[in-house]
Image: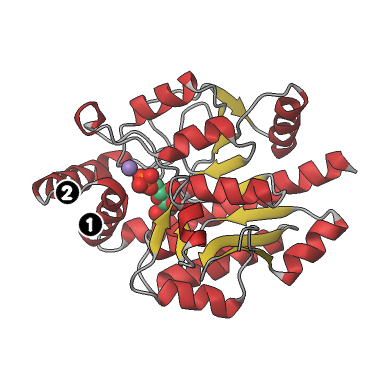
């Protein structure tokens, strides 16, 4: 086997043929970001939210060596229940396919797959970024470099608040990635609607975001856009309330020597326990909110292309 085994879900093929808007969704949030059964329930709700706003969802994953663009109900349920699934980024997605493995795609790998499939808009919870203490650990998510090179507009609720937000946004600036806050001046901080960081760019209208995506393409600029969409305030956990839990989870990760790909899943899991589930409720609300905005942007993009 030397050709890429790309498998489209039937409704994604139909949407592509008809030029309908499509929104890519990642699978690492399902396998490594949320516990079962809330993970599969959320994945279904997110797909429904995309549909309710006029676009077709395409959840992306590698299953038994095939790169799937859109999963069936059974595939989604099976993936969500598995106890061990690889977490795939740019470095390992091709190796997983070549060895007939199964893996969930992170933001970086989902962007790569979405672009291959001709999908321009992708919704998730929060992107990876520069971890606190990165000056020693060098732990910087491959998501940032992917945003710099793959032309997909990614809608997220900011970088996850477990990260060093200041350094994350510095790196994005260096890499030439547009960071656009939706509807407010401050950058959101994942579980919290706001942060102390001013957003470099602000847009209040999804069609401007779609237009900016097209302008980058027209100018031959590489890379995507990062849309920082704040969690609805009724669902947020204020940053001050969350800070001690984040600090405790970080200390535990350090004490237990958690490193590399395990860091983010460990921290999300501990914060879920320390907030007695509130972080998960907020995470679900913010992903749904991102799915809505992404569907609108995808709709605007399709309308421009008509
Ligand atoms: N958004 C969420 N939960 C998650 C993620 C995003 O709400 O678990 C995942 C994404 O797949 C992202 C990854 O790419 O976390 C970041 O992992 P790392 O820090 O190891 O690059
Ligand atoms: Mn990392």
Helix, strand or loop at label 2? It is helix
| Residue at the extreme top | 174
Q: Between residue 245 and residue 6, name the one nearer to us.
A: 6
Task: From this view, report whether residue 257 is shown above or below residue 214.
Answer: below
Ligand 2, image quadrant it occupies: top left
Image coords of residue 200 (percent x, y): 52, 21
What residue is rendered at 46% in x and 72% in y? Answer: 79
- Of 10 and 92, which appears nearest the observer? 92
Q: In which quarter of the image is residue 251?
A: top left
Mark 2 and mark 1 lie on one chain; the one further toward the N terminus is 2
Q: Find the residue positioned furthest to the front.
A: 1
Q: Residue at x 19, y 44 (%)?
A: 250
Mark 1 CB near ligand 1 (8 Å cut): no
Left or right position of 252 against 43:
left
Residue 141, position in %: x, y? 38, 39
- Lateral position of residue 290 relative to residue 241, left or right: right
**Circle 1 residue:** 270
Give the residue pinned by disc 2. Answer: 253
Q: Distance between the residues labelled 2 and 1?
A: 9 Å
Out of 112 and 228, give the one closest to the viewer.
112
Secondary element at tag 1? helix
Tag shown at residue 120 = none
Q: Can residue 31 be seen in this view?
A: yes
Residue located farthest toward the right when viewing the structure as drawn: 306
Q: Where is residue 190 in the image (x, y as percent from the top left)?
A: 41, 44
Q: For the residues carrying marks 2 and 1, which lies nearer the camera in this image? A: 2
């Amino acid at each position: 086997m030397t050709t890429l085994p790309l498998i489209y879900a039937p409704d994604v093929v139909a949407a592509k043929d008809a030029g309908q808007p499509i929104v890519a969704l990642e699978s690492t949030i399902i396998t490594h970001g949320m516990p079962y059964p809330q993970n599969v329930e959320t994945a279904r709700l997110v797909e429904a939210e995309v549909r309710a706003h006029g676009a077709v969802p395409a959840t992306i994953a590698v299953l038994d060596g095939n790169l799937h663009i859109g999963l069936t109900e059974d595939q989604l349920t099976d993936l969500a229940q598995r106890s061990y699934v690889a977490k795939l980024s740019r470095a390992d997605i091709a190796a997983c396919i070549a060895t007939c493995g199964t893996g969930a795609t992170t933001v970086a790998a989902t962007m790569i797959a979405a672009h291959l499939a001709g999908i321009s808009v992708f919704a998730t919870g929060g992107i990876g970024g520069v971890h606190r203490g990165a000056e020693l650990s060098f732990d910087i998510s491959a998501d940032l470099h992917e945003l710099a090179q793959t032309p997909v507009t990614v809608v997220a609720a900011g970088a996850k608040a477990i990260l060093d937000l200041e350094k994350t946004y510095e790196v994005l600036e260096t890499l030439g990635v547009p960071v656009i806050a939706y509807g407010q001046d401050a950058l959101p901080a994942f579980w919290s609607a706001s942060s102390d960081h001013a957003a470099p760019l602000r847009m209040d209208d999804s069609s401007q975001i779609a237009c900016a995506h097209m302008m980058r393409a027209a100018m031959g600029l590489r890379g995507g856009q990062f849309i920082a969409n704040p969690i609805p305030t009724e669902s947020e956990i204020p940053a001050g309330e969350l800070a001690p839990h984040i600090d405790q989870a970080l200390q535990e990760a350090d004490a237990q020597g958690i490193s590399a790909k395990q860091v983010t899943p460990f921290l999300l899991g501990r914060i879920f326990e320390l907030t007695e589930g509130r972080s998960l409720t907020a995470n679900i609300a913010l992903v749904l909110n991102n799915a809505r905005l992404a569907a609108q942007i995808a709709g605007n993009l399709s309308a421009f292309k008509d």
